[in-house]
Structure formats: C-alpha cells, structure tokens
Image: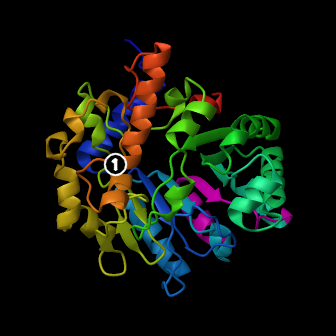
Amino acid sequence: MAIESPIRLVEEVVNKCVERYIPYSVMFELTYRCNLNCRHCFIVKDGNINELSTEEVKNIIDQLVEMGTFFLAFTGGEIFMRDDLFEIAWHAKRKGFLLTFMTNGTLITPEKVEEIRKMKPVKFEFSLYGATAKTHDYITRVKGSFERTVEAIKRLVECGIDVTIKTILMNLNVKEREEMEALAEELGAHPRINPGLAPRRDGSLEPLKYDLSFEEMIEYLPEDYDEVMLSYLSEKSKDISDRFICKAGKAGCCISPDGTVYPCVMMPIPVGNLREKSFKEIWHTQPSKELKRLRNLTAHDLTTCPSCDLAPFCIRCPGVVYLETGDIVGASPSACKYARWRKYVRTHHGNTATSIGGLYYEKTKGR
C-alpha cells in the first residue's frame, strides 16, 4: 500500500474542512489595545470596545473544541496587554489546541519567558519592521521597541520555542530586506518577509502610502521573490480563476475582542456575535446572509478577474478587495499592481507562471 506524503495528507484534511465548513484554523483577537503605534497598522483603535472577559473567552474556546478547530492563534492589538493571557492560553493548551502567539514582544519579561517555556506553544510570531533600531522604531513610533523585540526573540529561541519573524515590506524598510533576512538567521528565527499593505479596517487608505511603488518592487525585490509570497488561503484548483475564491468563512475565521465573528482577520464583515449566539448557530445552524453569500461565491461571480490578462500572475485576497472597494467581487488595485510586477519579472527573466496560487509553503522557513 502506497504511503501518501505529509503535504498531500494535509491538503486532503484542509479540503475536507472546506467542504464541511469545519473551522480548523481560528484567529482570536484578544484585544485591540497596543503599546506601539505603527504607522501602517490596519486596526482602528477604539477605546470603547467592550472586551470579552476571561470566562467569556474560555467559553468560546470550549465551543471551538466542539466545532473541530485545532489551530488557534492569539493576536491583537498586543496580546500581552491582557493580564489574563496565560490563564486563557493554558485553558486552550489543556483543550489540545495547537497554539500560535502573535506579538510585538516588547512586553515579554524574563518571568513571562519562563511561563512560555513551560507551555511550549507551537509557534511565536514576532512583528519586526527593520534591521536597525532607527528604521523599526520610526515605524512603531516607540523608541527602544526594536531592542525589546529582538531581546524577546533571543530569549524564546534559547528556550527552544519556534519563532517566526514577520516583516511587511514597505517604502520605509525595503532597502533593509537582505539585512532583515540575515538578522532573522542570526537570531535563529524563520523570516517571513513579504510586501503588501492593506487599508485600515474602516476603509481608510492611509496605510497604503507606505506601500511599495512598482519602481521600488523592480529595484529592491529579487527576481524570484514572487515564488515565496504566501497565498495560503487560495483554493487549490486546476482552474486559475478558482484561485480567486478563498477559505475564509469556510475553514477559518476571526473572532474580535468583543466576540464578533468575521470570515477572516482581513475581511471585517460581521457574521454574528458570540455574546448573542453560539458559534454553532453562527457557523452552521443560523448562518447570516453575508456568510452564505461568501460560501456560495464562485469565480463566475467575480466582475473582472477571471477574464483579466493578469490572472495567471495574480494572488487575489478577497479581504483586501473588500477593504479597498467595499465588496468582495471586484478587482483589487493592490493585487493588480503586484500581478503586473510578477508579469514583468517573468516576462523579462524567462520564468514560468505555473506555480502561482494553490497551497503555498514558505520556502524561507528552511524546513
């Protein structure tokens, strides 16, 4: 009997989750509070939001067990702004979730490092926006944030925690791309360095003023960089146009600090609130019209993308489309720009366009 490869088995599990609407991966935004003030942040700061209590979060985690979730990521804001983070995380750990922590790391003390060492989460993801304090601190607008983040990374790597350094390339830091890759290697972490900023959740395009221009992409991104850009939400299909429909609202979702459920962290379309309904009701028994529409969406419903001559080069995120245009069926101006860049690179350097889309695995992780 032939033994299937691990990647093939993972793909089959994910496809089953999509077919049966099993939210195997959930991102839980525990707070929008943050001790940094990043220039490009897409979160709208709202001091009036009524955050879920410790017990409410635990109850939701219990519901996710019943729903079949196994990947659970805690994000913010800055998750260490919550004093009950470890109480919540230990509860999830005991329930068997594979945990990821997303943080800027500046609030991680030696005592917290020891607690993390005991917990052994699957992964820690740190946001780092430059190879130097000057660049990073300018972007975060907090002096000393670079040093504190790097120190936290060092401590967790020393404890044997799997660490990924996430960097969004923008016109403020793209010149340090190679230095950031070298810094991640020096620190013993996996680099995830990608271009592509999104509008703020309220539709403001202000963060996009930091996005790379076409000229900057050509000048500073290597020729093969499109091959490592992540498109983990694209559905695997032989039909190129089917790649424009993602798994959001089918096999994954995002829960906000006040219990609102969104199809994805990048798609702030409310489909229910866990203070008013159970997750099962929101997801299965009483899905909203917005969730039904998203699940029934096909490439044929898209207005321009399937017939576009840039389609073979395009990685389209429906969430970014929504933030940019207010709907999920149109073209994404930013995706079009990056598709033009990929077409330019492949046309001028003889690369093929056969491996864009589908389920990608980051080559930068070195695994």
Q: Residue at (25%, 69%) from the top-left corner?
A: 281
Q: Residue at (18%, 49%) from the top-left corner?
A: 297
Query: Which quadrant: the C terminus?
Result: top right
**Amino acid type at image mark 1:** Ser
Q: Is residue 235 above or below residue 366?
A: below
Q: Does the image show residue 152?
A: no
Residue 88 % position (x, y): 59, 69
Q: Does the image show residue 110?
A: yes
The residue under label 1 is: 332
Rendered image quadrant of residue 302: top left
Rendered image quadrant of residue 202: bottom left
Q: Is residue 205 above or below residue 352?
A: below
Q: Secondary structure at mark 1?
A: loop
Report the span colored magenta: 86-110
The colour style of the image is: rainbow
Residue 135 lies in the magenta stretch: no
